[in-house]
Amino acid sequence: MSKINKESTEFGEKAVTPEEKTGLVRGVFDSVADNYDIMNDLMSMGIHRPWKDTLIRMIRPKAGLNYLDVAGGTGDIAFRIKKKINAQRPTKEGDITLLDLNPNMLSVGRDRAMNTGKGTDFNWVCGNAEYLPLEDESQDVYTIAFGLRNVTHIDTALTEAHRILKPGGRFFCLEFSKVQVPLMDKVYDLYSKNVIPFLGEKIANDRESYQYLIESIRKFPTQELLKRRIESAGFKNCHIRNLSFGIAAIHSASKSH
Ligand code: SAM
């Protein structure tokens, strides 16, 4: 009997129960953690870096605020936020919290912070975007980069983001999205279907995990649909910024005062 019923969800192309999905996603990132940073550069040909820099320019990090980076993985977003704040010679203390489902990803991030002098003053939290272990209205900025498509219940994660933000707090989601240019979508589809699992097999010896990553991109809501779901979680002023023809997009929104 098919597992597709109201209790089922998708893990890439497969129908699974919600509990199975969370466990499978944890397994994927257990498996990719050690090679995550190098594979990210290879698969995206480095383009995830300017995308992340664009996100940071939109955030305009300032000292004295509380930042929460959900699905923070090996630290790319949190480290960039910290770098911007340090450049301002801060006088006010703020907090940067990195939360991730996967302890291995966090451990790679923590080693990276130590080994590259990025500082030790991050809060590293192992947790789920769907149940944030944080007080209501405690954070100024919420970010999630390439994380939301892995979350089992996206709307629950969005509601949690809204709950923990202060009134006036800002939400940012950087995620793969729907290519907006005809033909370009075909080229991108061919690349992602063929090249990425191939690189996963040859470099990380793990075709399956990279196959899942590609399938999860294809299943993720389009720019407009995600915007509606962000608004349904209670956010206002939701804007979409497409990156590289819509291969990725940044959704930004705010919580009302
Ligand atoms: N944000 C980092 C970046 O941009 O490089 C890492 C992105 S990585 C593709 C996705 C991350 O989401 C993984 O570290 C994974 O463990 C995490 N993740 C998946 N599901 C999650 C959930 N429900 N709650 C928190 N983190 C989750």
Image (cartoon, rainbow, N blue to C red):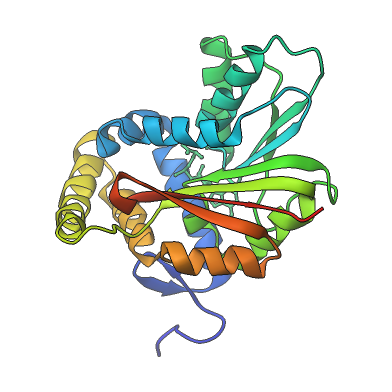
Tell me if residue 32 comes above or below residue 257 in the rendering. above
Asked whether 178 or 30 is in front, the reply is 178
Residue at left 51%, top 78%? 8
Tell me if residue 242 comes above or below residue 54 in the rendering. below
The answer to whether any part of residue 153 appears in the image is no
Q: Position of residue 112 (x, y in %)?
A: 52, 19
| 230 left or right of 244 in image | right
Give the quarter of the image for residue 96.
top right
Tell me if residue 141 comes above or below residue 21 in the rendering. above
Tell me if residue 213 comes above or below residue 139 in the rendering. below
Q: Position of residue 111 (x, y in %)?
A: 55, 19
| 190 left or right of 143 in image | left
Residue at left 76%, top 28%? 95
Q: Position of residue 172 (x, y in %)?
A: 58, 46
- Number of numbered discs on residues: 0
Q: Residue furthest bottom?
A: 1
Give the quarter of the image for residue 158.
bottom right
Q: On the rendered image, what quadrant is the N terminus found in? A: bottom left
The answer to whether any part of residue 162 appears in the image is yes
Q: Position of residue 30 (x, y in %)?
A: 47, 42
Asked whether 143 or 61 is in front, the reply is 61
| 255 left or right of 232 in image | right
Residue at left 60%, top 26%? 81
Give the quarter of the image for residue 169.
top right
